[in-house]
Image (tube, helix red, strand yellow):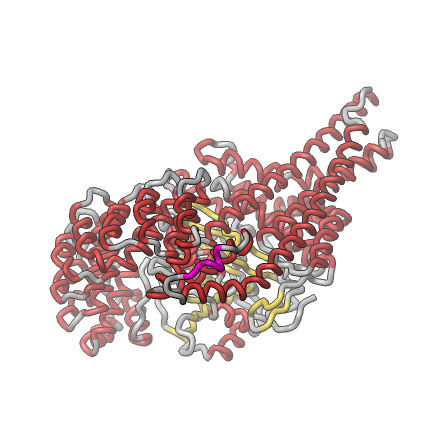
């Protein structure tokens, strides 16, 4: 029996080792593919024909939808920054999703808002709207005050009110670079009617100098927690998503910054109000909708339009965020499980969805089982300490390699962090990530399974230090 | 029991990975250092070279003796300076820059690059030839429009828009019906800027082409360019079987604004396709008159929100007669009609862009 147990443990350990190599190789391939695609896009956009044509008469007007819940600290500053966007024709629709603080009051005061009898198209159902406000000073600003129904419900309300064929979903607390919209709209200008969604890059604002709703100087935060997240964002959200977009199999467009064709989103059913991962869920549903009807489409990722967002600075808030992300991921994959492995859904069904199941959804479970195995083996006298230690170092080194590569590629492609010292700190972040941060996120992500099974749909509050308030967030 | 995983390979993996991480970290700092050196050198040389370029451009004939002796790094800088200036300068100065570019051999190089095996190089060369406005490039650019790579074709279409004369631009009209949407779209963008010079060719293409997408693009261009000679054709298209053709024709007709279209718009309000009804109402919001009030008041009861919206907008634009119709609509039993009338009475004028 003990021989059988020892053999089983040995094989399981080998399985975990293979999984570690597979998951890190998966990130490595995605990072390299993402970088290749980024450089290709950059070469294209630098061409004079591309630079000039963005201001052509074909540039479509855009409705910017910004749901806000208890955002009184930053809301005025952020709306001002949205109104200053460099774009030919756009409207800003801020949806106050039943805030309990003075979000609406601050907006009314700052923009001289007046209640409007604005009529709108009831395309998607949602919680009742209490009032619609227009600003005589800013004719392209609309504020919607509605009963709280969650972010997806707020976005659906914004969609109902939007007048333009393309909408940009952003977080009210995010800061867009002035030309971000102009850059993100490029796939829609290139292939109208075919491009149905495009995602932009979300970067970490903590530590940056921000005044008047603009990022004036990009700097790294002093604290380790947000800095580690910068490395993580580079690896997973920048090059990872760029890599997936190569084969039209991108599954996630961040809720903080994405551009969608309104008609395609409405036909797919709009945002799911019963999901906490509404951003991913909508993208997967749009893939599904188009592929089932065999309609040509493109969902892209553009590497140069940038949206700045504040990441959690405390473990408590980070835990809420990560469990919510994981619950959203599980929910979306479970909802659309019938697409997995089906050739009918092309690269989405055959590559990206199975990849997400194995490497995104299940990876924390495998990783945690690896950690749990150590005390079990130790207690049963089967632990080979040298082997376990070396294995841990290999896994960590591979992770550091992928992160360092992401930092290097960021420096070649974007160079947002000017000082050489910053590079050193980012590399240190890539190493530090493996000591505590990674294990904690693994634990939270496993806990998310339990929360998902309990039917937990809560978002949890995000405590912000106020990136747009003028002070330098640390 | 034989261990499945042994320590030896794992140790080797550690060493290999450590070496890879080290190499990556080193290359990060090395590439940062190299790019700093290049940037410093180019910022030191650029003012001097720009002055040289200006002097050479102002001398008649262009004197390139100083520029021709430059090293490789400086020549690359001179080329980018010339391209940067040519992007914004036209007229005599623009021609001098083209002459300089030609005399320094850059134009010949770009023409050679158009035959490169790398598509990105061909695309860059095509775009640069467009920036520099070299007339001798037109023939090669026309060939590049049929390149196998979409990027090259897009860049070539744009370049022809920059350099081509009316005869060359006429060749682009056919590209409106190109199977590749990206290329067709680029041709449409280019013609939206320069299409006035070949209005006749666009109208004739819209009339004769068998390509549906090409016809739709040409009708759109007629509207953007306000080609009034296409009035009869548009009137014919407004009764086409294809609703998309009807929509685009009514939109183009509204942009041209010929009073002859008024009856067509009134008829369009009864069209079975709602986008056509919507465009007809939008057209009437641009130049409707009191006789349009009764059909618009009827359209205010349409089941489609956008038709109601534009009908109400048109009524608000028409003036007192339209406003009276909107006020009367406040008594309608249907709350959707009442809401729209109230909104437009309050808001007055609102003309957003249609989906």
- Left or right: B103, with A393 as reference point: left
In this rendering, the answer to whether A309 lies above or below A1 is below
Residue B206 in view: yes
Q: Is residue B9 left or right of residue A298?
A: right
- Residue farthest toward the front in the current orientation of the protein: B65
Foreground residue among B190 and B261: B190
Q: Which residues are magenta?
A: B63-68
Q: Tell me, yes or no, if residue B272 can be seen here.
A: no
Location of residue A387 by image quarter = top right
Residue B193 at x, y percent in the picture: 30, 59
Quarter that holds the C terminus of chain B = bottom left
Which residue is located at x 15 percent, y 57 percent? Answer: B230
Classify residue B329 by image quadrant: bottom left
Q: What residue sits 47% from the left and 77% below the top?
A: A111
Q: Is residue A265 magenta?
A: no
Q: Main secondary structure of the magenta part?
A: helix
Q: Depth check: B1 or A240 in front? A: A240
Give the residue at x 64% y 44%: A449
Q: Does residue B67 show up magenta in the picture? A: yes
Using the rendered view, name the quadrant where residue A30 is placed.
Answer: top right
Identify which residue is drawn at 20% across, 42% down.
B210
Coordinates of residue A260 in the picture (x, y in percent): 43, 53
Please give the count of numbered marks on the rendered protein.
0
């Amino acid at each position: 029996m003990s021989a059988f147990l020892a053999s089983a443990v040995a094989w399981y350990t080998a399985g975990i080792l293979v999984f570690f190599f597979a998951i890190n190789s998966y990130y490595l391939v995605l990072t390299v593919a993402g970088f290749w695609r980024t450089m290709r896009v950059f070469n294209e956009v630098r061409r004079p024909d591309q630079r000039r044509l963005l201001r052509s008469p074909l540039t479509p007007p855009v409705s910017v939808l910004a749901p806000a819940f208890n955002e009184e600290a930053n809301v005025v500053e952020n709306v001002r920054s949205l109104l200053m966007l460099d774009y030919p024709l756009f409207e800003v629709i801020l949806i106050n999703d039943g805030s309990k603080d003075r979000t609406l009051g601050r907006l009314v005061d700052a923009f001289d808002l007046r209640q409007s009898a604005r009529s709108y198209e009831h395309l998607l159902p949602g919680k009742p709207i209490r009032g619609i406000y227009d600003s005589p000073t800013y004719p392209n600003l609309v504020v919607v005050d509605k009963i709280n129904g969650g972010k997806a419900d707020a976005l659906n309300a914004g969609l109902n009110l939007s007048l333009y064929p393309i909408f940009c979903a952003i977080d009210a607390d995010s800061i867009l670079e002035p030309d971000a919209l102009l850059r993100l709209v490029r796939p829609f200008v290139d292939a109208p009617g075919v491009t149905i969604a495009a995602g932009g890059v979300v970067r970490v604002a903590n530590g940056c100098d921000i005044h008047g709703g603009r990022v004036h100087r990009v700097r790294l935060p002093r604290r380790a927690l947000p800095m580690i997240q910068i490395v993580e964002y580079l690896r997973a959200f920048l090059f990872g998503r760029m890599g997936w977009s190569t084969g039209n199999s991108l599954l996630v467009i961040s809720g903080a910054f994405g551009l969608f064709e309104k008609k395609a989103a409405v036909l797919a059913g709009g945002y799911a109000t019963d999901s906490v991962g509404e951003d991913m869920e909508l993208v997967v549903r749009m893939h599904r909708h188009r592929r089932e009807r065999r309609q040509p489409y493109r969902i892209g990722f553009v590497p140069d339009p940038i949206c700045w967002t504040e990441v959690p600075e405390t473990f408590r808030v980070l835990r809420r965020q990560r469990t919510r992300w994981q619950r959203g991921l599980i929910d979306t994959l479970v909802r659309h499980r019938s697409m997995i492995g089906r050739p009918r859904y092309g690269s989405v069904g055959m590559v990206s969805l199975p990849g997400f199941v194995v490497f995104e959804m299940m990876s924390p479970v495998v990783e945690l089982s690896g950690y749990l195995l150590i005390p079990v083996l130790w207690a049963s006298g089967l632990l080979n300490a040298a082997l376990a230690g070396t294995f841990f170092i290999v896994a960590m080194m591979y992770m550091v390699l992928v992160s360092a590569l992401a930092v290097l590629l960021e420096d070649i492609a974007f160079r947002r962090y000017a000082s050489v010292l910053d590079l050193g700190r980012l590399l240190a972040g890539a190493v530090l990530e493996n000591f505590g941060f990674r294990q904690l996120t693994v634990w939270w992500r496993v806990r998310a399974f339990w929360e998902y099974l309990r039917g937990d749909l809560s978002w949890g509050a995000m405590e912000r230090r106020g990136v747009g308030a003028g002070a330098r967030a640390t | 029991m034989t261990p499945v995983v042994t320590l030896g390979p794992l140790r080797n993996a550690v060493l290999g990975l450590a070496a890879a991480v080290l190499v990556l970290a080193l290359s990060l700092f090395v590439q940062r250092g190299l790019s700093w050196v290049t940037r410093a050198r180019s910022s030191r040389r650029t003012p001097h070279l720009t002055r040289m370029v200006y002097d050479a451009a102002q001398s008649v004939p262009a004197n390139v003796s100083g520029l021709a002796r430059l090293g490789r790094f400086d020549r690359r800088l001179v080329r980018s300076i010339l391209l940067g200036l040519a992007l914004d300068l036209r007229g005599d100065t623009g021609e001098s820059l083209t002459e300089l570019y030609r005399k320094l051999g850059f134009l010949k190089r770009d023409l050679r690059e158009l035959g490169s095996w790398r598509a990105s190089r061909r695309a860059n060369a095509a775009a640069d030839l467009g920036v520099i406005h070299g007339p001798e490039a037109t023939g090669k650019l026309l060939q590049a429009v049929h390149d196998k790579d979409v990027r090259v074709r897009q860049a070539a279409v744009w370049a022809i828009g920059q350099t081509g004369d009316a005869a060359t631009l006429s060749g682009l009209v056919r590209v409106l019906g190109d199977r590749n949407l990206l290329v067709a779209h680029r041709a449409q963008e280019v013609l939206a800027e320069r299409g006035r010079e070949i209005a006749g060719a666009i109208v004739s293409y819209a009339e004769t082409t068998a390509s549906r997408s090409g016809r739709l693009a040409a009708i759109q261009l007629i509207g953007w360019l306000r080609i009034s000679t296409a009035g009869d054709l548009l009137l014919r298209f407004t009764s086409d079987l294809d609703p998309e053709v009807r929509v685009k024709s009514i939109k183009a007709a509204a942009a041209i604004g010929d009073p002859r279209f008024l009856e067509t718009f009134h008829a369009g309000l009864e069209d079975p396709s709602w986008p056509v009804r919507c465009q007809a109402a939008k057209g009437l919001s641009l130049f409707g008159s009191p006789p349009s009030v009764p059909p618009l008041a009827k359209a205010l009861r349409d089941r489609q929100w956008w038709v109601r919206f534009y009908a109400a907008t048109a009524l608000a634009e028409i003036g007192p007669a339209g406003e009276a119709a909107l006020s009367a609509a406040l008594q309608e039993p249907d709350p959707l009609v009442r809401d729209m009338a109230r909104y437009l009475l309050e808001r007055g004028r609102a003309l957003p862009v249609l989906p």
